[in-house]
C-alpha cells in the first residue's frame, strides 16, 4: 500500500500513537496506533470505537523521531 492509498483508506484525525519502534538494521519503522474506528467510512454501530492497528514501513534507512 502506498502512502496515498493509506491516506485515502484511513482517517487518522484524533487517533493516538501508542508506540514507535525503529529497527535500523532491518530498516523497519513500526507505529502502534489507537485508530478512531468510529471515524472510518466503514464503521457500523456496535463496532468498537477504538482499534489498535500497526503501521509498518520497510526500507526506512533513517528515523529521527517525531518533530
Image (cartoon, rainbow, N blue to C red):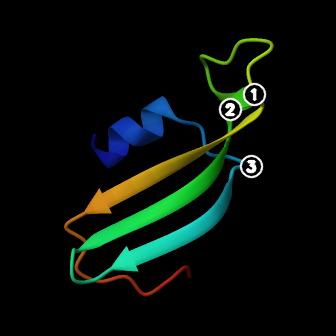
Tell me the mark number nearer the camera, choosing from 2 and 3: 2
Q: In the visual, does 30 lie left or right of 36? A: left
Q: SS class of the residue under badge 3?
A: loop
* Along the line of sight, the residue nearer the viewer: 7 or 33: 33
SS type, badge 2: helix
User: Which residue is at the far top?
Assistant: 45
Residue at left 52%, top 71%? 20
The residue wearing badge 3 is 14
- Which label sits in the foreground, 1 or 3? 1
Residue 48's mark? 1
Q: Position of residue 1 (x, y in %)?
A: 28, 40
**Residue behind mark 2:** 37
Q: Quadrant of residue 64?
A: bottom left
Please report the residue visible at 49 percent of the width from the left and 83 percent of the height from the top: 65
Task: State how far apart marks 2 and 3 are (Cα).
Answer: 10 Å
User: For this view, does 8 lie left or right of residue 13?
Assistant: left
Amino acid at each position: 500500500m502506498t502512502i496515498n492509498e493509506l491516506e485515502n483508506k484511513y482517517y487518522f484525525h484524533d487517533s493516538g500513537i501508542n508506540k514507535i519502534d525503529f529497527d535500523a538494521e532491518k530498516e523497519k519503522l513500526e507505529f502502534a496506533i489507537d485508530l478512531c474506528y468510529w471515524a472510518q467510512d466503514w464503521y457500523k454501530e456496535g463496532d468498537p470505537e477504538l482499534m489498535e492497528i500497526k503501521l509498518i514501513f520497510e526500507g526506512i534507512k533513517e528515523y529521527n523521531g517525531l518533530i
